[in-house]
Amino acid sequence: MIDRKHKLSITRQATALGISRSSVYYQPQPVSDGDLALMRRINELHLDYPFAGSRMLKGLLVGEGYKTGRLHVRTLMKRMGIEAIYRRPNTSKPAPGHKIYPYLLRKLPVTRPNQVWARNITYIPMARGFVYLAAVVDWVTRRVLAWRLSITLEVDFCIEAVKEALAKHGRPDIFNTDQGSQFTSIDFIKMLKDEGIAISMDGKGSWRDNVFVERLWRTIKYEEVYLHAYRSVPEARMAIGKYLNFYNRKRPHSSLDGQTPDKIYFNPLQPVPVAA
């Protein structure tokens, strides 16, 4: 947005855009090795104890010998895009001014492919640094329809993944997300509305839906990510893509009576286990 070669000064451009001048000059600082190690351990603990908030995680970390405080743990959790999963009045906080849509899945039997798609983001550690993985998942078959990696939590990579899923697989009746700012953004909502897709957002009493997505993240991380130390984003993208191909085509799922997501997704005439 800021054009450093424009005849207007940077100060006047920042004023016109309604942003602080200091943010224009700010250079992001690399995450320290200590914080990277702490973030990885927080991520591992979160997968094992998804109900643990910053207070409990801080206690677990201190018990393991880490020197950290609750506020620092909470800051790192926010940077990683993770939060405790439990029944509560509110889920992820939308950005101010973003519209929240009602939850449409309560008591709705989800029994066929492309009836409901889900979407979420998770933190992926590398040898140095980290990236974020966004995936579009068919609710009943657990098939990963599209995915993207990004070095930031901006909405663009979320939109790209959904557009790829729509281009390859048609459109779902309902698209369900949490209330995170990426999913309540104007561009993301417009894309779904333009496709005529009903929008559902997790709310009070729907906390179990997050557990469904967390199971996917746990599987990917324990069966692929934690077994490797990706040296670069391209390496991470290639390895995760190879694993997700295996996940869809060959890996049997207990929730699918031992069948693969591909087999259930592409053979809709056979009985499908009712999604919990």
Image (spheres, rainbow, N blue to C red):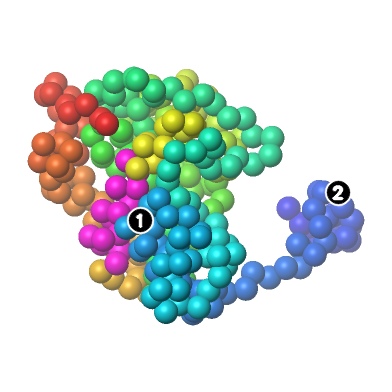
Identify the secondary structure beneath mark 2: helix
Horizontal side, residue 100 vs residue 26: left or right: left
Q: Nearer the viewer, residue 92 or 216?
A: 92
Q: Nearer the viewer, residue 63 or 1?
A: 63
The range drawn in magenta is 212-226
Amino acid at pointer 1: Tyr
The answer to whether residue 263 is magenta is no
Q: Is residue 73 visible?
A: yes
Instruction: Please provide percent x and percent y for residue 117.
Output: 36, 32
Whether tag 2 and tag 1 are in contact, CB under 8 A, the answer is no
Of mark 2 and mark 1, the one earlier in the sequence is 2
How many numbered marks appear?
2
Mark on residue 16?
2
Crowdedness near tag 1: few (<14), some (14–19) or many (≥20) residues, C-alpha within 10 Å: some
User: Which residue corresponds to mark 1?
Assistant: 49
Quadrant occupied by the C terminus:
top left
Identify the secondary structure beneath mark 1: loop
Task: State the residue at coordinates (15%, 49%).
Answer: 251
Horizontal side, residue 262 vs residue 230: left or right: left
Mark on residue 82?
none
